[in-house]
Amino acid sequence: MGKPKLKAHIINPEWCKGCGICIHFCPKNVLELNDNDKVFPARPSDCICCKLCELRCPDLAIEIEIEQESQ
Amino acid sequence: MRKENIKFIQGNEACVEGALYAGLDFFAGYPITPSTEIAELLSYRLPQKGGKFIQMEDEIASMCAIIGASLTGSKVMTATSGPGFSLMQEALGYAVMAEIPCVVVDVQRGGPSTGIPTHVSQGDVNQARWGTHGDHAIVTITASNHQDVFKTTVDAFNISETYRTPVILLYDEVVGHMRERLVVPKKGELPLVQRLRTSVKEGVDYHPYLPREDGRLPMSDFGAVHRYNVTGLFHDMWGFPSDNPDIVHGLLRHLVDKIQNNVNEITRYREYHLKDAEIVLVSYGSSARSANHVVVARRARGEKMGILELQTLWPFPYDLVREKCANAKYVVVVEMNMGQIMEEVRKAVDRPEKVFLANRIDGSFITPTDIRSILRLIQGKGV
Amino acid sequence: MAVKDYIRERFFPHIWCPGCGHGIVMNSLLRALGELGMSKNEIVMVSGIGCSARISGYLDFHTLHTLHGRALAFATGVKMSRPELNLIVPMGDGDALAIGGNHFIHAARRNIDLTAIVMNNRIYGMTGGQYSPLSGYGTMATTAPYTNIDHAFDTVELATAAGASFVARSTTYHVQQLTKILKQAILHEGFSVVEVLTQCPTYFGRKNRAGGAVEMMESYKKDTTSIGSKAKKENPDLIERGIFVQKELPEYCDEYDKVIERAKAKMPKE
């Protein structure tokens, strides 16, 4: 059982309000705001799947999808 | 052994008997003279039939608790007097807005404020109509004797369920505390209206605030298969808040019309000797007992006097009152306040100047003698 | 169930301001419910009035949006008549402890099985930023333009003194702890109080130069500590987080069931 591998950052731009909480508290500095003031993963390969962005989002706008372990 | 179930009890107890007969499941209340006996009796009787009683921390909490319980499908009631009734107004308005069946008993005492706790008045009539803020309609019923207290209590639950509305039982300290004979009707003798539950199946869209064709609004218990929202804000038919002008207008009209358009169905009254009456006494509650006494005595002497005893005070039965007073020379409203129902009777009749007030507002019970002195003044015979 | 299964998706995005802590409380609560595997039909959410109270409209439970301060009274009626239902009562700080203060202490005293979540943002947000009993001495608000002279009380101490059998506190920074605490609060059979320090960047933050959501959450990290930690001993001004009270006491509805048994036993035989 290895470390969880990121599949994707699923971000809902309709729900994201650009509050910056996920960006600030990401331990690996993966996220940034785009030109529309919505979050996007600027450095997705640095993501360690801690999911703190998903847990702290007030708008349920970001979800971390994990790669399923192959048998 | 007597077949009839006869009791010699207080009016408050007659109300309790009526509520239990109607299927009361849940009572939340707070002690206040002269209604306390209702709470005490129900604390004893309700758990005997598996019902729930709770003494809350104040009247506001009591009114809120019964609304919560009603949403789970229970038949609910609370009881209070003037000061507590004042406290309950906000939550009462919530029950009106969210269309939640419940019965609120106000055993009136002298007011305003702390007033005169152990003495009678009928001062809360207009408060029952307009105590809660905003345009709204309300149902308010009263009675003058214990048999009618029992029956109007059952009626209150029935009307509450039929129209999904709070109903106020506006009794008074004399009726509440005096002892009188009550024949408890047998099971099945008085019709009961049960909670109308929706037949919409699980998974199908349920609208808590969409009337059926016959105007009734089927409910769904909290905890059952339909999850919806209940709020005191103006709301759409799913119960979600809205400030859309069409929705606001539609809902307000619905809340008022469902009561106002059914005045005939909701009106209860008694009448004696009205057919050829030249003087009509209009009265209600314990005042009607004295008024009736005067009518009986005067008729025995050949005077053409009659009485219209109102049981439904709100929605006020203007048409009924106009009809019953049409041929009267004088209409005398007998009540223990400063003319709250007299004002409505004035609005109803063909000539307002023929309406007079025979009242007493000092905490003492209005007696036939009091009424007679005022009648003599009105009829110009002097004191 | 997943978080999204518990929401009324058609109403999102919700009305809370960008960075509002209430959204984070909602997030943590839904995770707690999901981890507990609770089914939606068994949950009744009763809220009062205010920004916090709006949470109920967004969630797919039996939702009862009541009157300012009165949520616990309504919830008492629901719970007593249907004790098998799971009652969650999210309230604001003013909602629960100002106008609702009386109902709060009595619900605690009764130990009735409700889960009260006090979403404490130390302000009346929906009406535009007036001070609340939790704002604290020296803070600024629209109704305290010369600084507030009201001292706050301590929700945990108040709940404890009133007899609550489960009392806990966390913050919107400490989301993992918050979810754990909410799970335990919901499972606890008795009156549970969870106070959550949550940020109102729009009013409390601006008026008190506490920064935006991020700065306020950083302050929750900096100014709080675990119960009885070394840091607390060194700095008594730190606010403690964790479970303060967790007792097994007779629950009110269970006690009333015994009343019913006693009443039935005493009935005269026909």
Image (cartoon, coloured by chain):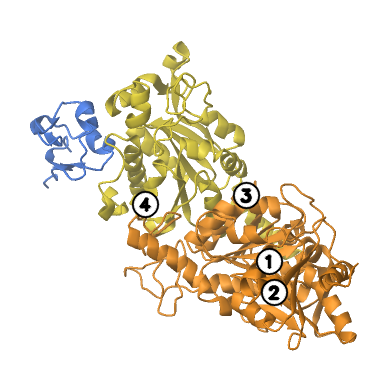
Chain colours: A blue, B orange, C yellow
Near-viewer residue (B20 or B331): B331
Q: Residue at x 34, y 23 (%)?
A: C221
The nearer-to-camera label among 3 and 2 is 2
Q: Are marks 1 and 4 on the same chain?
A: no
Could you tell me the amino acid type at mark 1? Ile
When asked about the image quadrant of residue A56, the answer is top left
The nearer-to-camera label among 3 and 4 is 3
Chain for disc number 2 = B
Q: Residue at x 42, y 42 (%)?
A: C50
When asked about the image quadrant of residue C42, the answer is bottom left
B247 left or right of B257? left
- Which residue bears the numbered disc 2? B310
The nearer-to-camera label among 4 and 2 is 2
Chain for disc number 1 = B
Residue C19 screen position, x and y as percent: 28, 34
Could you tell me the amino acid type at mark 4? Gly
- Which residue bears the numbered disc 4? C57
Q: Disc 1 and disc 3: Cα gap in Å?
A: 23 Å
Instruction: Check if mark 3's residue and mark 4's residue have beta carbons within 8 Å.
Output: no
B362 left or right of C139? right
Could you tell me the amino acid type at mark 2? Leu
Q: Are marks 3 and 2 on the same chain?
A: yes
Instruction: Check if mark 1's residue and mark 4's residue have beta carbons within 8 Å.
Output: no
Q: Are marks 1 and 3 on the same chain?
A: yes
